[in-house]
């Protein structure tokens, strides 16, 4: 292990002071420390992109929970990532309204364009594609979110335009 | 109150749920997630039935039996078509992902899922898709994990976390990805993990040691037995095949262990199959004493003749054993004469057990069963780490702490069995429990207050609380708090024990209980309970309790020169005497005859050794901590030339033509004689039926009706079928003929009922859910309480002396470990693995001062020895105290209360890890 790696793994096993400050703010609103578990996971994920085993253990320790207890919460929610994701996560709705409006073709287009299927990350690590059961925008179906942006009334041209700067690649790592 | 099920009128109890009512009525309503000890959460949807609004309602609606409370006159149907279809559909959906691996699954043949699948009539698979698969985890040497078989009933998580207080097993993910396991692979931390094997309705968690020499349930030969792992006396059902003890299952006794065992009890019997068991009698130097002589194997008859020759007409002393049966100890005492019999307790043990017995004989407080302890609403623990000294009791205490939540639930009219609702209501509110002990205990996580004091200070503290109850003010705020907690409680429990080997703690606990009872008058019951060291400490203690001047072990060592021979019964003296005392006993002039199971140094230094049967190969009576006498029966016949201790002693007596024992040839005759020997043993004959018991003309069968009698296992020796052994000593038979139904509770070898092959068939043996066994009501209960208190109280004269510690010295205190501290179970491979290394336990400041961290080594020096031990760092510890792992080989010679000096072991180097076999172990078997 190089020195660089050791420092990085150390950083992963402890919470940063910014993270602690944000978690403390949440703790003020809950009667039990474990009550802030979901928020703490979101805070750490916002900082680190995903929740590694080490991050999870660090949060559990801070909230005085067992790692198993927190693991149960972290893995229950689709949007807490327990594996590394790309820079942006594509949340693609495959629920009923979007399906009626032809989301399957759009999904195929995205997969072809980026070379990834559900649960996979592009080789350039820019995007991870994940299905979601609804984004609450059925009136504008089909929809998806890329990062924090909602894209509505999707069609193939829009996909082409959206990912124009992403070079077509073979299937990604994850 | 009555309800109607399919037109049938059923008498029900107010407050129970419909599932319980149906099971109590003997109806077969399938279920998965409901567990009698854990209540309902309604997650599996299996116990569906139809409820009708009124007699006119013919359509009804589907309800879940376990979530529906009975109401007078309510109408249900089990057999309505929509109900049966619904239940079948539930099993069909569970079967989508369940593998078809029953033939290679350890649960097969005693699987609740198999039973329920057959019961609902699901047969043909319609789903053609792929099944979900999961990765399994390495969970330690005791539990095998096979997640693919999971039907997500959540019983494991609810048992492990909610019931047993474990934190390292949980549910993960959602939908059809749900996974039950640890955050990372590793040994399950709970001392009660083994119950997962019985709690899981299918084969996700199975008994790992059992898998190494597996047999189907129907091929196991079982007998009702009592765990010899500690003084609690849990009822167990060990199973044998091919002369090996295969596994131990729980045997229900509603007053003692209920549905659960600790891991020592379940997995700690592997020593019975150990290579270190003695097979044949050994005579050192063929009768000629010589220091380095090895043993020559001799025939049984020669061994007995030799021994008789050494004993007959000679001055002989006998040393008994707290892990041998009452009958064996009694026989030995009669053989050598009362004044020549030493209990075999160490002096300190003898004093504390004597105290406990004298208290139980006189106390005005209630001596509770484990079941009663679960009803306590405030608990004070004095000096014990109960999870490690009487594990099953600790599990009961965890349930008692929930009484606070039941109180809250009652205010809302919520029944106790509404588990999720009651837990949600209470959150982390628990009944109060104060632990006063020298150092960390495994119940610390649920205690309302922790007080760390040395043993002498614990006794003082308890006296101060007593004084406070009697009106004396105390400067110590904690004293007042504990006094307030106890006086506010409706059913307070004070629990102490022998682990610190301090009679003062025990007496002070009794004092406190008396004062508390006086304070409360008769209206409220004060419970007082003690943990004792070994399986038959109480039986042995009662045997010598009336002796005016009992022969202490240390005195026996001193007067050894005056006798010709010593007869030692199942006792490794190294655990109780100092090296110099041992040297006296084995000085050479006196012949030493030892009877034992496993090799140890006491045997090695004896002149003649006689191999004895283990608890699973013999019958005997053990008296537990509450003075309940219970009998265990042989599961299989002892191999080679092993005999039960009482058989050796009877044969010896016969050859010696012993007058007092003339006419005693059978076990029941020993029981009879013993019951007449002292008034306290009067009820001994009522503990269990004698050998003449017959159920409808037949003995109770040890084998199942499906037992595969024929086997080719011995075909290399002989192709002829060997005859079954005959058993003329017990009411059980080595046979499949006979009935295993409604017999006395003490004679149920295993549970099985038509359609119910798993341990869930227990409900067919119970008079009602969570109630006593039918057999216990019809015949006598399971076991007999020997001590009935006179309730006159004792006058306690406490003389608490505080040891003066010189600077740089510490008081050494015993730390008990579920795995490792008990003598016999430590010979089991898996237990030895979990026991790990002997240790010395230090507070953080001491560790810092010595410059050591957890896992490093420290040299502990007493007056006459130096031992290097691994360091364990404690989170709390009383002043000037350090702990040591008691009962480990390496710490055998350390004694409680020793004054020791400590220094860092400079010669110690961190071990160089080259490779680990963990990867292999995780995939093994």
Image (cartoon, coloured by chain):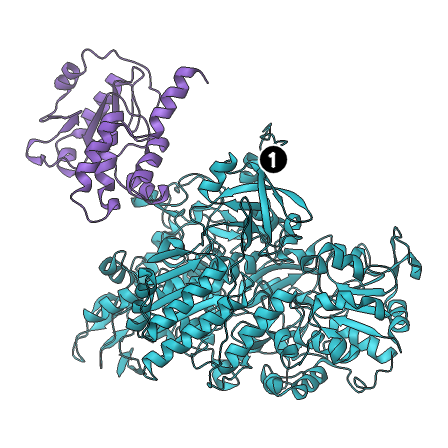
Chain colours: A purple, B cyan
> Disc 1: which chain?
B
Instruction: Identify the image quadrant of the N terminus of chain B.
Output: bottom left
In-image side of B820 versus B100 (left or right) = right
In-image side of B106 versus B135 (left or right) = right
Can residue B30 be seen from the camera position used here?
no
Q: Is residue B458 above or below residue B851?
A: below
- Looking at this rendering, what residue extends furthest in the left direction? A139
Q: Is residue B484 above or below residue B212?
A: below
Q: Nearer the viewer, residue A38 or B323?
A: B323
Q: Nearer the viewer, residue A22 or B338?
A: B338
Residue drawn 47% across and 78% down?
B773
Q: Position of residue B119 (x, y in %)?
A: 41, 65
How packed mark 1 is, by other alpha carbons closer than 10 Å (few <14, some 14-19, many 20 or more), is some
Q: Position of residue B445 (x, y in %)?
A: 37, 53
Q: Secondary structure at mark 1?
A: loop
In-image side of B608 versus B543 (left or right) = right
Q: Position of residue B599 (x, y in %)?
A: 75, 55
Q: Nearer the viewer, residue B671 or B822?
A: B822
Q: Position of residue B248 (x, y in %)?
A: 57, 61
Q: Is residue A43 above or below residue B170?
A: above
Q: Nearer the viewer, residue B313 or A108?
A: B313
Can residue A90 be seen from the camera position used here?
yes
Residue drawn 58% across and 76% down?
B630
In-image side of B480 versus B326 (left or right) = left
Instruction: Identify the image quadrant of the C terminus of chain B.
Output: top right
Q: To which residue does mark 1 refer?
A: B905
């Amino acid at each position: 292990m190089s020195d660089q790696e050791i420092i990085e793994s150390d950083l992963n096993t402890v919470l940063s002071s910014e993270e602690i400050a944000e978690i403390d703010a949440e703790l003020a609103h809950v009667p039990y420390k474990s009550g802030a578990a979901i928020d703490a996971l979101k805070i750490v994920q916002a900082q680190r992109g995903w929740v590694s085993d080490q991050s999870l253990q660090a949060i559990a320790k801070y909230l005085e929970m067992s790692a198993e207890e927190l693991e149960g919460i972290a893995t229950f929610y689709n949007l807490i990532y327990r594996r590394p994701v790309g820079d942006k996560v594509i949340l693609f709705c495959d629920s009923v309204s979007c399906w009626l409006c032809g989301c399957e073709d759009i999904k195929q287009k995205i997969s072809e364009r980026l070379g990834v299927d559900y649960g996979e990350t592009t080789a350039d690590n820019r995007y991870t594609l994940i299905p979601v059961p609804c984004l609450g925008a059925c009136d504008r179906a089909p929809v998806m979110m890329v990062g924090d942006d909602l894209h509505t009334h999707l069609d193939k041209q829009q996909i082409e335009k959206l990912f124009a700067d992403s070079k077509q690649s073979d299937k990604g790592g994850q | 109150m009555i309800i109607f099920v399919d037109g049938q009128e059923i008498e029900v109890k107010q407050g129970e749920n419909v599932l319980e009512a149906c099971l109590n009525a003997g109806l077969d309503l399938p279920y998965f997630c409901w567990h009698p000890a854990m209540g309902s959460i309604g997650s599996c949807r299996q116990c569906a039935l139809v409820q009708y609004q009124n007699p006119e309602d013919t359509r009804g609606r589907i309800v879940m039996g376990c979530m529906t409370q009975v109401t007078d006159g309510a109408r249900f149907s089990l057999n309505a078509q929509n109900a049966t279809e619904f239940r079948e559909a539930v099993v069909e959906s569970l079967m989508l992902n369940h593998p078809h691996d029953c033939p290679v699954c350890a649960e097969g043949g005693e699987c609740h899922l198999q039973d329920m699948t057959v019961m609902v009539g699901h047969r043909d698979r319609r789903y053609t898709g792929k099944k979900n698969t999961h990765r399994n985890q390495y969970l330690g040497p005791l539990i095998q994990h096979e997640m693919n078989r999971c039907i997500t009933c959540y019983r494991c998580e609810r048992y492990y976390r909610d019931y047993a207080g474990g934190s390292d097993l949980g549910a993960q993910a959602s939908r059809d990805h749900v996974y039950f396991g640890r955050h990372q692979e590793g040994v399950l931390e709970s001392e009660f993990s083994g119950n997962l094997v019985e709690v899981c309705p299918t084969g996700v968690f199975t008994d790992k040691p059992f898998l190494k020499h597996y047999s189907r349930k129907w091929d196991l030969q079982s007998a009702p037995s009592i765990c010899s792992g500690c003084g609690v006396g849990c009822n167990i059902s060990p199973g044998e095949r091919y002369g090996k003890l295969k596994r131990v299952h729980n045997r229900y006794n509603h007053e003692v262990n209920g549905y659960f065992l600790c891991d020592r009890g379940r997995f700690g019997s592997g020593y019975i199959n150990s290579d270190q068991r003695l097979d044949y009698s050994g005579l050192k130097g063929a009768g000629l004493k010589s220091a380095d002589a090895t043993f020559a194997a001799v025939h049984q008859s020669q061994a007995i003749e030799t021994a008789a020759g050494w004993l007959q007409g000679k001055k002989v002393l006998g040393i008994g054993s707290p892990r041998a049966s009452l009958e064996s100890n009694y026989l030995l005492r009669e053989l050598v004469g009362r004044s020549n019999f030493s209990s075999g307790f160490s002096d300190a043990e003898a004093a504390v057990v004597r105290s406990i017995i004298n208290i139980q004989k006189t106390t005005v407080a209630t001596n509770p069963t484990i079941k009663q302890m679960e009803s306590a609403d405030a608990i004070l623990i004095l000096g014990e780490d109960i999870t490690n000294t009487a594990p099953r009791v600790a599990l009961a205490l965890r349930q008692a702490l929930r009484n606070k939540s039941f109180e809250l639930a009652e205010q809302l009219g919520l029944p106790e069995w509404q588990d999720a609702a009651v837990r949600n209501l209470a959150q982390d509110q628990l009944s109060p429990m104060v632990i006063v002990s020298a150092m960390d205990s495994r119940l610390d996580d649920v205690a309302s207050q922790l007080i760390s004091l040395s043993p002498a200070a614990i006794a003082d503290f308890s006296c101060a609380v007593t004084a406070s109850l009697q009106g004396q003010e105390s400067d110590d705020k904690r004293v007042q708090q504990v006094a307030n907690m106890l006086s506010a409680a409706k059913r307070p429990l004070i629990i102490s024990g022998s682990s610190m080997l301090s009679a003062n703690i025990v007496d002070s606990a009794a004092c406190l209980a008396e004062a508390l009872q006086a304070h409360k008058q008769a209206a409220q019951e004060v419970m007082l309970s003690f943990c004792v060291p070994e399986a038959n400490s109480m039986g042995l203690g009662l045997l010598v309790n009336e002796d005016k001047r009992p022969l202490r072990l240390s005195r026996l060592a001193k007067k050894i020169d005056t006798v010709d021979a010593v007869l030692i019964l199942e006792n490794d003296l190294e655990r109780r005497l100092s090296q110099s005392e041992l040297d006296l006993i084995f000085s050479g002039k006196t012949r030493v005859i030892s009877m034992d199971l496993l090799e140890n140094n006491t045997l090695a230094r004896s002149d003649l050794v006689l191999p004895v049967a283990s608890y699973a190969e013999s019958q005997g009576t053990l008296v537990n901590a509450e003075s309940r006498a219970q009998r265990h029966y042989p599961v299989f016949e002892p191999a080679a030339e092993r005999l039960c201790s009482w058989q050796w002693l009877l044969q010896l007596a016969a050859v010696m033509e012993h007058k007092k024992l003339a006419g005693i040839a059978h076990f029941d005759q020993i029981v009879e004689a013993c019951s007449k020997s002292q008034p306290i043993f009067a009820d001994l004959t009522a503990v269990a039926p004698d050998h003449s018991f017959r159920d409808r003309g037949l003995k109770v069968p040890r084998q199942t009706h499906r037992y595969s009698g024929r086997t080719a296992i011995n075909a290399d020796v002989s192709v002829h079928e060997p005859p079954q052994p005959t058993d003329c000593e017990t009411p059980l038979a080595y046979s499949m003929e006979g009935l295993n139904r409604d017999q006395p509770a003490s004679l149920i070898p295993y549970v099985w009922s038509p359609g119910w092959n798993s341990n869930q068939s227990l409900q067919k043996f119970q008079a009602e859910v969570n109630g006593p066994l039918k057999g216990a009501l019809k015949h006598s209960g399971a076991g007999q309480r020997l001590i009935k208190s006179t309730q006159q109280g004792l006058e306690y004269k406490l003389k608490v002396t505080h040891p003066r510690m010189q600077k740089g010295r510490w008081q050494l205190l015993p730390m008990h470990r579920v795995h490792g501290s008990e003598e016999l179970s430590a010979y089991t491979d898996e237990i030895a693995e979990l026991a790990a290394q002997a240790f010395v336990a230090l507070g953080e400041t001491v560790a810092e001062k010595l410059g050591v961290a957890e896992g490093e080594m420290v040299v502990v020096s007493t007056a006459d020895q130096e031992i290097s031990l691994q360091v364990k760092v404690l989170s709390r510890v009383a002043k000037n105290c350090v702990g040591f792992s008691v009962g480990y080989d390496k710490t055998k010679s350390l004694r409680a209360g020793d004054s020791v000096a400590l220094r860092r072991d400079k010669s110690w180097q961190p071990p160089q890890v080259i490779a680990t076999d963990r990867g292999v172990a995780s995939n093994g078997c």
